[in-house]
Image (spheres, rainbow, N blue to C red):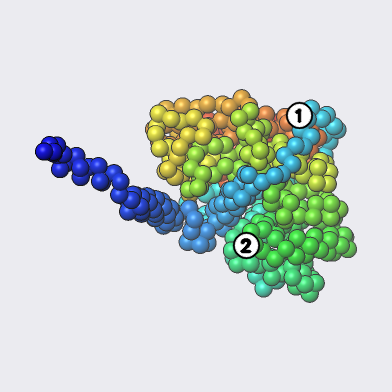
Amino acid sequence: MVNHIAVPQAKYELLTDTRQPRWRTQVVCLALTFLIVGFLFILRGWFGILSILKAPKVDRFAEAQTDNAASAAWLRRARMYAESAKENQNADRNTSVSATEQYHRNTTGQVIVCYYTIPGNLNTSWELSPSHIDPHLCTHIIVGFASVVNCTLDIGDNGWIYERVVALKNREPRLKVMISAGGNTELHDGFSEMVKNHANRKRFIQSVLNVIKTFHLDGFDVDWEFPAWLGADEREKIHFAQLLQELRKEFDHSGQNLILTVAVAAPQAIVDQSYSVPEMAEHVDFINLMSYDYHFYVWYFPVTDLNAPLFPRSTETGYLSTLNVNFSAQYWIAKGMPREKIVVGIPAYGHSYMLDNPLNHNLQAPASGIGKLGDQGFVRYSTTCQFIKSGAGSVFNKESRVPYAFKGREWISYDNEESVYYKSEWIRTNGFKGAMILSLNVDDWNGTCYGANETFPLTRIVTKVLFKDSDK
């Protein structure tokens, strides 16, 4: 008789389970994984779309506020600078240029170029009128911005403003007053259409000469931001050089000793794409280097950083190490522009950010948008002064030689008297043509910071440094 040993059914079922194929389980796990990853990807994309939709005051400001040419142009430039950094931060570019800080050269003939942007409404005390400009601070005042419409220079209804700025020469006969074409012009492709052929350019140049003669101006500044950039026709780079050559020829034939200048980009990527530098150098009296807006809040790089650092920080590498005044100026020299024709830009405004965490207010701190102060992320110096007076902390970065301020969730990168002094000394000792201020309108022209006797404090520092050993 055989004894049968009973095997518990549960153990038998468990044993048979483990021997069955596992492909069904694997398929289920894989499907779940794809579902989760897909959901996260869709969620991330949705938040990205919401970020764009929630930021009309930044991305669509140029379209929504085209009546304010200065704000539209400044915002558009800041966005294009940010795009250049986004596209090139991982690019294999040569980021080494000669960057000596002590050059020592004869500084006679240096200039201080001051942009005066035509206000949107001169009926308010907040706007700088021509009568409040100190004509002794600048060697050149460039009034902007005229537009390029139907291949002609269009000043709109602003003729009387040009007349009042030119009248400042009665108080300072050595002052030069120029007109700038640009501002919100690029929104309507005025330059692109005008430079396409010789006939269009000839028509435009004649209109420039007519405006200069009518208002007794001393020259013309071209502020095209930017030829052949971001998908534009690559031939614009050549056409732009042709425009400058033809302008110079007609200016010389006029017998009026007219000045020709160009407002140019600072980021390396835009310089390479937009300009034939040796040809430009041959025809212009000098360039106005727009060495600011190196960092501005953008949703795809949401951290605080400096508007116009003089030098890079030791932690910045690669393309990021090129986003500073020193590199830009030296790069223009390396590309073929004589240092004696480079006027280095200094902003009288700052950039605001909204901090994610008010306790983290250092450089590269996470930010959720532009700050509440200022206009679309641009903050006048007088507003920054009041911000600091209200108890905001201020830090001067010794490497970059510019400050930033913070209070609560508000964070502002700006230039003050100390940083402007450093920049002016650097311009002087390196033998550049001079300094450019953008703009008189956003300097503390009405004495908010230090009282009525201390107007235009940033511009005044530049004047004191550049002309401390000579009579302007």
Residue 315 lies left or right of residue 342; in this view the side is: left
Q: Is residue 81 visible?
A: no
Q: Earlier in the sequence, mark 1 or mark 2?
A: 1
Residue 210 lies left or right of residue 149; in this view the side is: right
Could you tell me which residue is drawn at 51 percent across and 37 percent down? 304
Residue 241 lies left or right of residue 183; in this view the side is: right
Dot 1 surroundings within 10 Å: few (below 14), some, or many (20 or more)? Answer: few
Q: Is residue 302 visible?
A: yes
Question: Whole-Å distance between the Cαs marked 1 and 2?
Answer: 35 Å
Secondary structure state at the residue bearing disc 1: loop
Quadrant assignment, res 206: bottom right
Residue 213 lies left or right of residue 18; in this view the side is: right
Dot 2 surroundings within 10 Å: few (below 14), some, or many (20 or more)? Answer: many
Could you tell me which residue is drawn at 74 percent across and 70 percent down? 196
In the image shown, does 155 or 187 lie closer to the viewer? Answer: 187
Vertical relation: 157 (above or below) 311: below
Quadrant assignment, res 222: bottom right
Q: Give the number of the disc on residue 186.
A: 2
Secondary structure state at the residue bearing disc 2: helix
Q: Quadrant of the C terminus?
A: top right
In the image shown, does 122 or 267 lie closer to the viewer? Answer: 267
Could you tell me which residue is drawn at 63 percent across and 28 percent down? 314
Q: Give the number of the disc on residue 101.
A: 1
Looking at the rendered structure, the number of numbered marks drawn on it comes to 2
Q: Give the number of the disc on residue 383.
A: none
Q: Residue type at mark 2: give it.
A: Glu
- Farthest front residue? 1
Vertical relation: 253 (above or below) 17: below
